[in-house]
Image: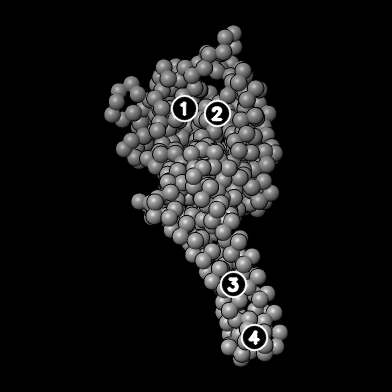
Amino acid sequence: MTRVSVYASALAAFVAATAMLVASIATPNWISYSVTTAKGDQIGKNIGLHKSCSNLDFPPQCHEYPTGEMCENGSRYFCSLWRTVGFMASLATILCLACLTCFLVVMRGGKYKRETGWPFVAGMLSVVAVVELVLISMVAYLFDHDVLSFTMLPTLHRAISILPRIVSFRTMSSSSNASVLQQSVKLACIQQHVNSDKDSNLRRASQLVSQAASAGAKIVVLPECFNSPYGCGNFPRFAETLLPSPPPREQSPSFHALSAMASENRVFLVGGSIPERDAEVDGRFYNTCLTFGPDGGLLDAFRKIHLFDIDIPGKITFRESDVLSPGNKISLVRLEGYGTLAVAICYDIRFPELAAIAARKGGAFALVYPGSFNLTTGPLHWELLARSRAVDNQIYVAMCSPARDMTAGYHSWGHSMIVDPMARILAEAEEGEDVIFSDLSDELIVETRRNIPLASQRRFDVYPDVSKGGDDTV
C-alpha cells in the first residue's frame, strides 16, 4: 500500500465517484417517467432531489421539487422523506470532500503516512458508502411503496388532460412566425351601389371588377347582397338555386356572372353574397358567398353562419332568421400562389372564435367580410370590429359594404375598409360608391407576430384553445 500509484488510482476512482454524486444532486434525473397517448404524443417528466423538469411547459422548464403546495396538501410524509434524502446526499458530498482531503494528506505525507494512513482512508470510504446506501434505500423504499407514484399521479393526470392543448400550443408557437402569404398581393374592395334591378347590379359589378383588376388588384371583393337590395323581404324574391353546381344559367345568373368576371379579369373574386334558395327544402334560404378563381372555377361557397337578429329599442329591429337559415361550415379558401383567405359575412365578424379558427388553425393571411352594417351599428362597431379582428389575429382584415342609399328600405353604413395586422386602417371609403385598394405583404404579418408574440404567450393550460374548433366545421 506504499506505492503512490496505488493511492493515485484509488483517488482517481473516488474523484470520479464524487463527481457523479454531485452531478446526481444537481441534475433532475433520479426518477423519470413518460406516457404515450393514443395519438402518439409523448409526455415526459424527470425528478431530481431539488427540482423537476417536464415537457408540459413550453419552452421546457424546471421547477422546485417538491413544491410547497405538494407538502401542504396531503404529501407531507413524502416531503419529509424526500428532504431527508436530500440531507443524506448533502452529507455524503461533505464526507466525500473530507475523504478527498484525507487522500491528499496521506499521499503528500511521505512513506510513513502512506503505510499507516490507509486504515483511516478506508474507514472514511466505508462511512461514505454507508451514507449513500441509506440514501439509495430511502429512494427505493419510496418507489417500492408507491409513495412516489402517489405524488406523481396528479401531475400525470394533468399531463394527459392538457396534452392536446400543449401540443396545439407548441405547433402554433413554432409556426407563429412562419410565412402565411407567399407573395405580396393587391386587394380591392368594391363598395357598389345596389338597386332593385338584378341585371343592372350584375353589369355594374362587372364594370367595377374590371376597374379594380386594371388597377392591379389580384383579389377583388364585392359587398354583401351585391346583386339585390339587402332586406328580409328581398331575400326570397332575388334568391337563386346554386345546387347542383354548376347551376344552369337561367337558374343562377349571378353564379355565371361572377365566374365570367373572375376569368375575364384573371382575378380571385370573393363574390360578396347573394340570397340562395335551398334546392331540396322549399322555403329555405341562405345568405351565400361564392369565391371564384382566375380560371372562372368555383373555389368555395360559404353560407353565413351567424344570422343578424338584433333589437335596439328606438333604433333598429332586424331578424334575418325570420327568412334565412344559417350555414355550418367555415370558409378557408386556398388561393394558388398566395395562401389561404378566410371568408365570412357581416354579422359573423362579431364572433372572434370564427376568426381565431381561420387565422390560427386555418393559417389565413386575411379575413374578408362582405357586410352591410346599418346607420346604428355602423358608426358604433364597424371600424372597432375590423380593427379588433386584425389585432386579435395579427392578419389583414377587409370589410366590404354596399354604398349607402337613403332611398332604399335598408340604409347601409358604407365605409368599406382594409386593416393591417397592427390594426392600422390602410384604406377606407366614404358612404358612396367607390373602389379601395391596399397591398398586402407577408413581411408585415411576420414582423407583427415577431414583435408582439401572442402565439408563444397564450396559456392553453389555463384556458381552452378556441381555435381548435370542430374538425367537421372546416
Tell me which numbered mark, 4 or 3, is placed earlier along the sequence: 4
Where is mark 2, residue-wise?
350
Q: Which residue is mark 1?
A: 306
In the rendering, at what x and y percent does residue 134 appear?
49, 61
The residue under label 4 is which amino acid type? Arg
For the residues labelled 1 and 3, the Cα–Cα distance comes to 79 Å
Cβ–Cβ under 8 Å for marks 1 and 2: yes
Q: CA distance from mark 2 to mark 4?
A: 86 Å
Q: Are there few (<14), some (14-19), or many (20+) residues within 10 Å of tag 2?
A: some
Instruction: Tell me where residue 304 appears, x and y as whole percent.
Output: 45, 30
Identify the mark nearer the N-term, 4 or 1.
4
CA gap, disc 3 to disc 2?
Answer: 75 Å
Which of these two is toward me, 224 or 35? 35
Query: Judging from the image, what secondary structure is the residue with disc 2 in?
Result: helix
The residue type indicated by label 3 comes to: Met
Q: Earlier in the sequence, mark 3 or mark 2?
A: 3
Label 4 – label 3 distance at C-alpha? 15 Å
Indicate the quadrant containing the C terminus: top left, top right, bottom left or bottom right.
Answer: top left
**Residue at point 31%, 30% (across, down):** 279
State the residue position of label 4: 114
Q: Amino acid at mark 2?
A: Arg
Q: Nearer the viewer, residue 145 or 355?
A: 145
Whether residue 220 is visible:
no
The figure's colour scheme reads: one colour
